[in-house]
Amino acid sequence: MRLHVGCAMWAHTPWQGRYLPHPLPPGERLRAYATWCNAVEGNTTFYATPPPATVESWVRQTAPDFRLLVKLPKTITHERRMTGAEEDLRAFLAAVEPLGPRAHTLWIQLPGSFTPGDLGTLAAFLRGLPRSHRYAVEVRHRAFFEDRRAEGMLTEVLTGAGAEWVPFDTTALFRTPPTSAAEREAWTKKPRLPRRAFALTDRPVVRYIGRDATAPTVEGWRYWVETVAAWLREGRSPTVFVHTPDNAGALPLTRRFHDEVRALLPEVEPLPDPMPAEPLTLF
């Protein structure tokens, strides 16, 4: 039984020399990260389709069972809004094909301006996608969380396409006023939405953001520890991403989340031992 966990990125300056070796060439950073976590959000593809050499580097640095939640480029989801984007989509799918099973899920993050009235566009887009990939959709319009009819319509569209609904749980972030610069910035950028936790497929995905302090972050994920353990008992294969506003301690926090699930389900496979941040010496 395996639980996949990860962060929003695999290279972050505060991690260098503290959790990950430093200096480390760009072509080795994902490999080092993969000794801490067995999944990562592929946010970089939102900004540009990666060139072949970049994708080949990702393949070299990870095992086939490492999970990349690869985000569709914004040209498709935000600029063209899933209409007339066939050329961009073909280029993206061709680019990520060498990832094989590492491209665990293709992540369709939709803008906050995507409303229930746009569901026909989403349904048509999903129908046109190749069945060789899994898909997960993230929505940010409040109607999908507060209007039962809108929620049901989106669920029907996703279920019909075999796609997952990705929740981004920000409830811990917004529970109390911000206490750091990073938290204040997160308050201006992150969606303030009710928590949603209903898996539509056998491979649910969760994005969770806590606080810069450890205690409220851990307290806020208690719900997910229980939910993820229940999914594993049901035979599902979840992936959980842990964020904090500054992400400085996200690596050990992600492993702590994994440990808390394992405390409930000891049969969950342990994560690998992290690569030492400091080089080994004889003395």
Image (cartoon, helix red, strand yellow):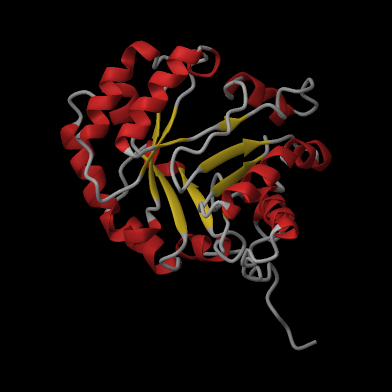
The quarter of the image holding the N terminus is: bottom right
In which quadrant is the C terminus drawn?
bottom right
Q: Quadrant of residue 136?
A: top left
Residue furthest to the front in view is 234
223 relative to 18, above or below: above
Question: In the depicted view, which residue is nearer to us: 80 or 165?
Answer: 165
Residue 97 quadrant: bottom left
Q: Is residue 110 above or below residue 136?
A: above
Q: In which quadrant of the rendered view does residue 233 lie?
A: bottom right
Query: Could you say where residue 250 lies in the image, as x and y percent from the top left?
Result: 67, 48
Image side of residue 137 versus residue 11, left or right: left
How many marks the image carries: the answer is 0
Q: Is residue 6 visible?
A: no
Residue sitting at x 78%, y 20%: 177
| Viewer-closest of 172 and 211 | 172
Question: Which residue is at the front of the view, 190 or 218?
Answer: 218
Provide residue 252's location: percent of width, then percent of height.
Answer: 71, 55
Identity of the residue furthest to the right in this view: 215
Identified at 46% across, 56% down, the residue is 67
Q: Position of residue 60 (x, y in %)?
A: 39, 68
Q: Can the viewer see residue 27?
A: yes
Extreme residue in the bottom direction = 282
Query: Where residue 237 sits in the image (x, y, percent)?
Result: 51, 53
